[in-house]
Image (cartoon, helix red, strand yellow):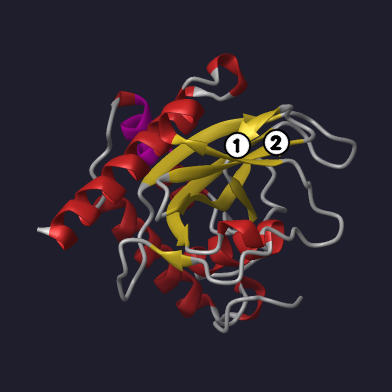
């Protein structure tokens, strides 16, 4: 599939390499400071599910699986990109399944590029090993080919300097809005509490980094 991370896919890795990848994910979770009790519970649940289900990176893990998403920020204008999810009927950040990729950050970047077409997306703050800024576990309703299950979402922050270059790939949703953080946070029931938390974290990171750069 075009755009996959360069690392071998989960199904192609040897057992020892699979356990190493899971340990790296566990270490990433251990290093994160949760913002509230819900995020703390979700991180612990993700750890427990990784221990119980070594195929947690595959969408075929029916109890739940790791997903990758990102808040996207127009850095110059301090605006967040909101994406209307057709099936869930609410505003969300972009993201999706890892599709057996072992590099979750690259899966988030791939999904963001496919869904938006933005050509210059970059992790923020810049770092050698991008880390999620937020974690969330949420339930996904039953579909024709999948029972109700959990998405264990690893959420990153991406920025763009070309917000007008939105060009979603064929077959992707085209309903997007660039909103200030205040506008996005005032959407009421059209966004959920976990997205509010993600937006607040993104806003704080942008403000802190920008202030430090201009000092």
Magenta-colored span: 38-45
Q: Is residue 141 above or below residue 157?
A: above
Label 1: which residue?
Answer: 92
Q: Are marks 2 and 1 in contact (CB under 8 Å)?
A: yes
Q: Is residue 41 magenta?
A: yes
Residue 35 point in image, percent of width and height: 27, 33
**Closer to the camera, 98 or 48?**
98
Q: Which residue is mark 2?
A: 84
Disc 1, SS = strand
* Vertical side of 178 occupied by 57: above or below: below
The residue closer to the viewer here, 26 or 87, is 87
Q: Residue 30's spot in the image, x, y percent?
A: 26, 51
In the rendered image, residue 200 lying in the magenta stretch gets the answer no
x 31%, y 76%: residue: 128
Q: Residue furthest left?
A: 215
Residue 105 vertical placement versus 199 (above, below) = below
Q: How many labels, in total?
A: 2
In this view, the residue farthest toward the top is: 189
Residue at x 55% of width, y 60% of height: 108
Q: Residues within 10 Å of mark 1 (few under 14, many from 20)?
A: many
Image quadrant for the N terminus? bottom right
How far is the residue under mark 2 from the one under mark 1?
6 Å
Q: Report x, y in % for residue 92.
A: 60, 37
Q: Is residue 7 placed above or below 125 in the rendered structure? A: below
Question: Residue 184 appears at what percent x and percent y?
Answer: 50, 30
Report crowding for label 2: few under 14, some 14 to 19, many 20 or more residues within 10 A (C-alpha).
Answer: some
Which of these two is toward me, 107 or 174? 174
Residue 98 visible (yes or no): no
């Amino acid at each position: 599939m075009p755009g996959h991370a360069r690392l071998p896919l989960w199904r192609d890795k040897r057992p020892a390499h699979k356990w190493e990848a899971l340990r790296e994910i566990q270490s990433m979770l251990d290093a994160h400071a949760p913002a509230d009790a819900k995020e703390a519970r979700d991180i612990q649940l993700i750890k427990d599910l990784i221990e119980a289900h070594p195929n947690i990176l595959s969408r075929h893990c029916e109890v739940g699986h790791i997903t990758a998403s990102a808040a996207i920020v127009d850095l110059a204008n301090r605006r967040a990109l909101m994406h209307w999810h057709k099936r869930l009927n609410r505003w969300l950040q972009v993201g999706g399944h890892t599709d057996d990729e072992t590099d979750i950050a690259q899966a988030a970047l791939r999904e963001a590029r496919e869904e938006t077409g933005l050509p210059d997306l970059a992790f923020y703050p810049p770092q050698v090993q991008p880390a999620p800024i937020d974690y969330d576990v949420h339930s996904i309703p039953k579909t024709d080919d999948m029972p109700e299950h959990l998405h264990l979402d690893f959420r990153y922050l991406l920025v763009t300097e070309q917000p007008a270059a939105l060009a979603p790939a064929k077959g992707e949703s085209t309903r997007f809005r660039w909103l200030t953080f205040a506008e996005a946070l005032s959407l009421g029931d059209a966004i959920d509490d976990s997205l509010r938390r993600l937006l607040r974290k993104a806003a704080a990171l942008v403000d802190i980094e920008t202030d430090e750069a201009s000092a």
